[in-house]
Image: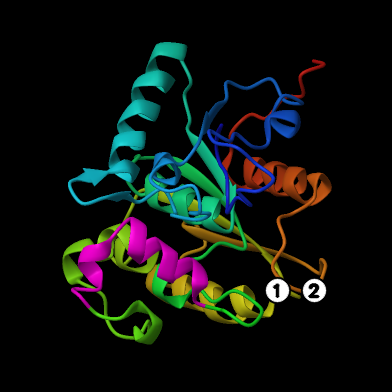
Amino acid sequence: MVSFHGALDRKRYSVPRFERLRSLTKYRVNSLYFSDPSLHIDPSLELSWFTGWKGVNVHRDMATWIAVTAEALGSDRVVLTGSSGGGFAALMVGSYIPDSVVITYSPQVDIRLYEAAGKYPHAAKRSYIRHVWPELARGQDLAKFDFAQKWDESIEERTSAVARYRQPRDTQILFVSNTRDTHHHQVHLPALREALGDDPHRFQLLSYAGPAGHHPPGPTEFERGLERAAQWAGFDLPSAGH
């Protein structure tokens, strides 16, 4: 089991940050936790989707480390999980690991599509471009940057799970979606679903009605997703007490 965190309030959390340890230790599994190295670039950066930066593909590097670790531990299946920005990372890293399973909770599926609630819906993307990918702006004023424009195709496979999954991947995806998270349920979910096509072996949806807006799943919903994925994808998820 591999866990990725989502956006971090840098006033509350320090980096490195590791999430879901308490939930995953309820099960008798090997587990690995990643913290986004890009967050070390600037203390104000809260979300950078584990993409890495120019010349460094963190998704691909993590996939290599995960495969080596799984082999060393004798794990016969790799299961990746995260919510929101961490869910995006799980999707992207999973696309590099054959026979992997991704359990993703209300994720972004394309960074360009992400809009936060409130007065500044593009603030996270603006900060991301400023600190991680300044090449995307090419001298443009970020206050006037058109986020709907097509980003540089050379990094599309780093910033879009939709682009990655247009090509067949040996990955099974359980998409856990809060139906009251309107933007992610109505924008991100359909975009990924269209890229994957109608293949029940590759994609399953688990919906629930959680709090209104974009929030990480509580422990109950998180563990329900793990157990549903185990049942569907056929991997063992024994409790730690057995």
Position of 21 relative to 153 (above/below): above
Q: Percent from the top left, x then y, of residue 62? A: 36, 35
Q: Is residue 131 magenta?
A: yes
Q: Find the distance from the CA under tag 2 to the CA under tag 1.
A: 6 Å
Q: Which residue has dot 1 on it? A: 181
Q: Quadrant of residue 21?
A: top right
The answer to whether residue 160 shows anywhere in this view is no
Q: Main secondary structure of the magenta part?
A: helix
Quadrant assignment, res 132: bottom left
Q: Nearer the viewer, residue 240 or 213?
A: 213
Residue 38 as seen in the image, left or right of residue 124: left
Q: Earlier in the sequence, mark 2 or mark 1?
A: 1
Q: Are marks 2 and 1 in contact (CB under 8 Å)?
A: yes
Q: Which residues are magenta?
A: 122-139
Residue 235 in the image, given as x and y percentages of width and height = 58, 34
Residue placed most toward the observer, 6 or 235 = 6
Quarter holding residue 204: bottom right
Q: Is residue 168 magenta?
A: no
Relative to 239, is 170 above or below?
Answer: below
Which secondary structure lies at badge 1?
A: loop
- Which amino acid type is shown beneath numbered disc 2? Ala
Residue at 35% over, 39% down = 97
Residue drawn at 23 percent across, 43 percent down? 56
Q: In the shown orientation, is residue 239 left or right of residue 167?
A: right
Residue pictured at 45% horizontal, 50% vertical: 89
- What number of labels is visible? 2
Colour style of the rendered protein structure: rainbow
Q: Circle 2: is it few (<14), some (14-19), or many (20+) Cα within 10 Å? A: few
- Mark 2 sits on what residue? 212
Expressed as whole percent of the image width and height from the top left, the position of residue 242 reads 79, 15
